[in-house]
Image (cartoon, coloured by chain):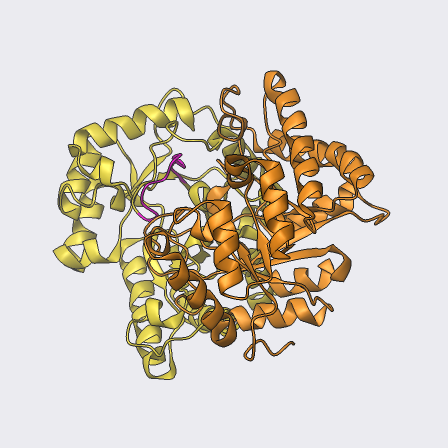
Chain colours: A yellow, B orange
Amino acid sequence: MRDLSRDHRWLSLNTATVRKQGSLIDIVEACARHGIRAIDPWRDQVAAVGLDRAVRAVRDAGLELSGYCRGGMFTADAAHRQEARDDNRRAVDEAKALGASCLVLVVGGLPQYSRPGSAPSKNLALAHDQVADGIAELLDYARATGMPLAIEPLHPMFAADRACVNTMRQALDLCDRIDPQRQGGLGVALDVYHVWWDFELFAQIERCGLERMLAFHVCDWMVPTTDMLNDRGMMGDGVIDIPRVRAAVEALGYDGYVEVELFSNRWWDRPIDEVLSTCVARLKTAV
Amino acid sequence: MRDLSRDHRWLSLNTATVRKQGSLIDIVEACARHGIRAIDPWRDQVAAVGLDRAVRAVRDAGLELSGYCRGGMFTADAAHRQEARDDNRRAVDEAKALGASCLVLVVGGLPQYSRPGSAPSKNLALAHDQVADGIAELLDYARATGMPLAIEPLHPMFAADRACVNTMRQALDLCDRIDPQRQGGLGVALDVYHVWWDFELFAQIERCGLERMLAFHVCDWMVPTTDMLNDRGMMGDGVIDIPRVRAAVEALGYDGYVEVELFSNRWWDRPIDEVLSTCVARLKTAV
């Protein structure tokens, strides 16, 4: 397990963490001030400044991208399937233009939430099949582009509206189903927030192996959690034994970025420099 | 699968559903008005009127008990373990006195939340072991008393503070670990609210089998869910395909009560008769 207490060279900032404090350009500049070497930007933040400008800003700052957020939302009724397909191919192209190491996939829940306007459904099994089909189809395109796809299992409390893939076991079963020969270009993004509760977590990390461990995200689980979406905690403020999870991930040979991704009304209210310096400090003591 | 559309003979009311509207005695009287034949009362509601009076009220009304809520909270530091042990034995005794079909177990999360005053811990693996040990020990007592224990897997969003058993697979693994010879007296309480999201749900219901399916609870998952604890939906108002889950449970041979358990600020604000008549109506159309 790497010693992260001395410097923060392996810190990556998911830009949603400070999305309320400024534009992607502001965030890139703030990362430079704090010696942060990598980011994982969101599509809407890139779109707000324009892809070309985002590409230049990232390149000029010498930033790496530990991922690009996000593709997915594969669940849709027939009328919205082409939209989902086109949208995901654009996400792959943007990720490639930005030089991301992978495209993070939030796979979608029930179609009426994932692709608004889709006919309402309670059929979760159908959603699972649509996700498998959607990833399989996108994978051909992504492989041709050279962009790995990282399935992110989301906490089960998001099963209806965001992602019906909710455990590492399920994500890895999907990988096996879509890529049985392990040709590659497909794996998972493990965010401790979503999977820390799972009694099978450590067994499934071992099963995952290095080649499918494409991203590692951290934040913390607060008790009580007052908002399902936007009350994630800063590392060390909650109950997740983050070092134990990191140890298991790094035991696979993982030596990539540790990405901080926090959706938090509390942290969005604070100055960007305070948030980043806290991320740096906590990476050294609580991750 | 039973036809529930004609009458509500298989409806049981978990008394937490109307806990704000009156005492256990009030609830028992309301059940009589609505032709509800069974309840699942909570310990604090029984304690508030006194065990003897509760026993008489239930007996005089001719009510059956589809369960008793609840035992558990096995996770504790050493200083609080005896308290947990004694408390759970009393729960078994009360369940027996009331004639419950099982004692529902909410197993506990991290000790500082399950048994307040316990030393803070982030060690979920230790919590899992404490749960297994606690159930195994209680099972001896419960078998001698003739009271089946029903492990209720709780939604993963409650893993820290309420229950670190969060899936049917995990609950059944626990049953196998504690009762490998299947001597009985140990099983699960399946609440659709907690497990509906699980891609393995139907495989694990099949694995469970009739002898370990001790209780079946229903309500619905709302999108959005505005309060993690107290925003459960009335059956039909949310996204859970309840009939599909019931069909799988009844395919095992299950022919017991369908228990309505709703924690909802919205429904607690309504008159008890409106809530009960809605439960009856929805049982016929949405379950």
Q: Quadrant of residue B35?
A: bottom right
Residue A219 rendering spot, x and y as whole percentages: 38, 37
* Residue drawn 17% across the image and 44% down it: A20
Residue B253 rendering spot, x and y as whole percentages: 74, 69
**Closest to the observer: B158 or B17?**
B17
Residue A60 position (above or below residue B249) = above
**Closest to the observer: A25 or A128?**
A128
Judge from the rendering whether residue B36 lies leftward or rightward of residue B226; answer left or right. right
- Report the magenta stretch's main SS: loop
Judge from the rendering whether residue B179 lies leftward or rightward of residue A245; answer left or right. right
* Quarter of the picture holding the N terminus of chain B: bottom right
Residue B123 in view (yes/no): yes
Say whether residue B188 is magenta.
Answer: no
Residue at the far front: name it: B60
* Residue drawn 75% across the image and 35% down it: B136
Say whether residue A227 is magenta.
Answer: yes
Residue at the far bottom: name it: A79
Residue A154 in view (yes/no): no
* Residue drawn 54% across the image and 35% down it: B47
Residue A103 position (above or below residue B48) = below
**Closest to the observer: A176 or B36?**
B36
* Residue drawn 46% across the image and 57% down it: A151
Magenta-tinted stretch: A218-229
Residue at the far top: name it: B79
Task: State the count of labels.
Answer: 0
Q: Quadrant of residue B246?
A: bottom right
Residue B106 rendering spot, x and y as whole percentages: 58, 41
Residue B29 rendering spot, x and y as whole percentages: 50, 55
